[in-house]
Image (tube, grey):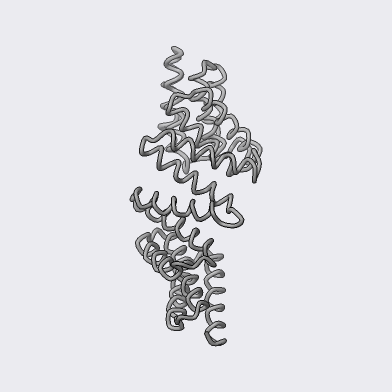
């Protein structure tokens, strides 16, 4: 690939980065398309030219995915994977492309293909030297969701626990990503009737989120609600009440953007209040939330 072509490709990539930083994704797609076309024109049996073409396709695929143009993203990722087939020197990129393709299929609600690509990505990241631990955790979390949706609780738990183990070791118990997986595992345990385990997972998620975000944050508020539901099942009704109230207050403070979350928490809290015989208070809360649209 001649130096003038390399320079133009570098200029186009810099332009894509600048446009994305400005939030101008539509124009960034045009710049990325120019890069794809230029690298395709220079494509030969030379590995450098193949790598440049695959990189340009991956870049445009990411933009398409950001814009919700999933079929376009799927096509670019597929082409990039075809270009890099049987390339052990590009194994991490292949794993990344498989992970991205899985996300596209997930967005397209094709769970079978999403699982196929995420399992392939998990295998690649696990066998890489060194092992790509954080990528393994991400794929494990994704696959756990799919297994849970398919009703395979044991497989879902195995994947969630793998992700949680890695994130605890690599990022620490109080990291945001660790809290996400703790919350996900807590939801699995709650749905499966493992109430004490659900309580502990949601407690861990809440502690991390309060430290990272404070109380008036949507993730913290959701953790208050989730913990309250778990506490009801372990007999800690007074404690559950306090967490419902914290969740309700946080979503009220957060405003109309989170009104659907507010309604969900209010519904859970009002159900609890009615079982406590506090029907008047429950009715008052429902009326107040309903008037906040």
**Where 111 sits versus 201, above or below?**
below
How many labels sit on residues? 0
Identify the residue shown where x is 50% and y is 24%. 230
Q: Position of residue 159 (x, y in %)?
A: 49, 40
Identify the residue shown where x is 60% and y is 43%. 167
Closer-to-camera residue (290/261): 261
Indicate the quadrant containing the C terminus: top left, top right, bottom left or bottom right: top left
Q: Position of residue 2 (x, y in %)?
A: 54, 87
Identify the residue shown where x is 46% and y is 18%. 273
Q: Dividing the picture into quarters, in which one does residue 286 lie?
A: top left
Q: Dividing the picture into quarters, in which one does residue 182 lie?
A: top right
Report whether 199 appears left or right of 266: right
Closer-to-camera residue (180/45): 45
Q: Dividing the picture into quarters, in which one does residue 270 lie?
A: top left
Q: Position of residue 255 (x, y in %)?
A: 50, 40
Identify the residue shown where x is 39% and y is 52%. 116
**Where 150 sits versus 241, above or below?**
below
Closer-to-camera residue (16/173): 173
């Amino acid at each position: 690939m001649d130096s003038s072509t390399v320079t133009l490709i570098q200029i186009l990539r810099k332009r894509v980065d600048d446009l994305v930083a400005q939030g101008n994704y539509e124009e960034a797609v045009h710049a990325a398309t120019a890069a794809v076309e230029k690298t395709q024109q220079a494509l030969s049996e030379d590995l450098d030219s193949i790598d440049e073409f695959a990189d340009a396709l991956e870049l445009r695929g990411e933009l398409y995915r950001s814009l919700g143009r999933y079929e376009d993203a799927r096509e670019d990722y597929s082409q990039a994977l075809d270009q890099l087939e049987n390339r052990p020197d590009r194994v991490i990129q292949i794993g990344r492309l498989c992970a991205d393709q899985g996300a596209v299929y997930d967005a397209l609600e094709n769970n079978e293909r999403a699982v196929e690509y995420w399992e392939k990505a998990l295998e690649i990241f696990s066998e890489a030297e060194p092992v790509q631990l954080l990528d393994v955790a991400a794929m494990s979390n994704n696959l756990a969701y799919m297994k849970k949706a398919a009703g395979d609780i044991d497989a879902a738990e195995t994947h969630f626990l793998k992700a949680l183990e890695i994130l605890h070791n690599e990022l620490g118990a109080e990291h945001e990503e660790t809290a996400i997986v703790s919350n996900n595992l807590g939801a699995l345990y709650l749905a499966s009737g493992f109430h004490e385990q659900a309580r502990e997972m949601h407690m861990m998620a809440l502690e991390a989120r309060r430290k990272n975000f404070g109380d008036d944050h949507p993730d913290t508020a959701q953790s208050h609600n989730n913990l309250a539901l778990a506490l009801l099942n372990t007999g800690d009704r007074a404690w559950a009440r306090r967490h419902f109230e914290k969740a309700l207050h946080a979503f009220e403070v957060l405003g109309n953007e989170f009104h659907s979350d507010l309604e969900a928490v209010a519904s859970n809290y009002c159900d609890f209040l009615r079982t406590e015989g506090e029907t008047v208070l429950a009715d008052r809360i429902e009326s107040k939330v309903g008037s906040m649209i």
